[in-house]
Amino acid sequence: MIIGFIGTGNMGLPMVRNLAKAGHTVVAYDQSISALESVVSVGGTVASSQREAVKDAETVITMLPAGEHVRAVYGSDGGLIANVSKGTLLIDCSTIDVENARLVATEAAARDLDMLDAPVSGGVAGAEAGTLTFMVGGPEKVLERARPVLQVMGKNIVHAGESGSGQAAKICNNMMLGISIIATSEAFVMGQKLGLNPKTLFNIISTASGSCWAMQNHLPVPGIVETAASNRDFQAGFSVGMMAKDLRLAQVAAKSVDASTPLGREAAALYTSFEENGNQNLDYSAIIKKISG
């Protein structure tokens, strides 16, 4: 099918590649010229505007930084909702606040357009491998319509509930991830100061009750876990800036429903401080630098 794709950054570009490899015609647009430069090399076509990218699209996918960008792209005077053809399927894969996700979905429904919020987990590596997890909010029948496209980019596609539920699931997940990597960092810094060899400690915890996904995949100590960014000077797969943003979104959501999240609040504060000290482009696991002092 013809797919319009808005947002070809670190996550969007490999998603475009996988869609093109599957035989879809992908017409892409990004406000950043540098972000568009590689689109042709991965099999996509570059559009000169977002309107051009979606004018013939049967499905539109967006991967944008924040809620204000999603609102602008979908709902502005020249936005997608007003300019796509009748029957176009809209899929927003950005990670944004629940309120904006629901507002945009309502605007789409007012024009009889099917829309899903479908944020992803798996990072750049998952996007490249086509193994992302999609947490999907919106009508189940719309998800079934979208499933053939999502399956090209992801391995796990989970219906979370009504519009906005995908975003709710994503911020819950990322709050847990942020807390987990902070706990992992604290344990390994303390262990080293107590004289433990980091590899020995990793081997012990891997088969003990303290084991967690963050440690197994993104251990912030180099030379032990092959997939860890710590082996590459914390070159970002999922950046500090993105984690800080998601943890702040989690706090907004927690406040809106009067949920107590003391560890989430502390994680948001730690990441925001680390981000503001110029570390926003490092991998999120670089938080160990702040923990170790």
Image (cartoon, rainbow, N blue to C red):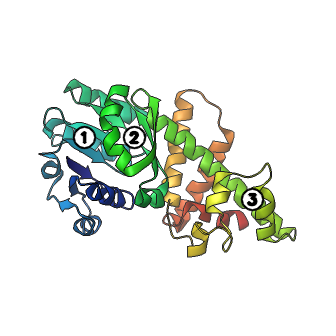
Among the 4 quarters of the image, the one containing residue 185 = bottom right
Q: Residue furthest right?
A: 194
**Of label 2 and label 3, which has the lower sequence position?**
2
| Left/right of residue 189 with respect to residue 162 in the rendered view | right
Q: Dot 3 lies on which element? A: helix
Q: Dot 1 lies on which element? A: helix
**Of label 3 and label 1, which has the lower sequence position?**
1
Q: Is residue 93 visible?
A: no
| Left/right of residue 196 with respect to residue 48 in the rendered view | right
For image coordinates 26% across by 31% down, the residue present is 114
* Marks 2/3: CA–CA distance: 32 Å
Which amino acid lies under the numbered mark 1 shown in the image of this protein?
Tyr
Q: Nearer the viewer, residue 285 or 281?
A: 285
**Of label 2 and label 1, which has the lower sequence position?**
1
Q: Position of residue 284 (x, y in %)?
A: 56, 60
Tags 2 and 3 touching, CB below 8 Å: no
* Marks 2/1: CA–CA distance: 15 Å
Number of the front mark, 2 or 3: 2
Q: Residue furthest front?
A: 22
Residue 74: give its label: 1
Which amino acid lies under the numbered mark 2 shown in the image of this protein?
Ala
For image coordinates 81% across by 60% down, the residue present is 204
70 up-or-down from 232: above or below: above
Q: Dot 2 lies on which element? A: loop
Tag 2 residue: 118
Tag 3 residue: 186
Which amino acid lies under the numbered mark 3 shown in the image of this protein?
Glu
Q: Is residue 81 visible?
A: yes
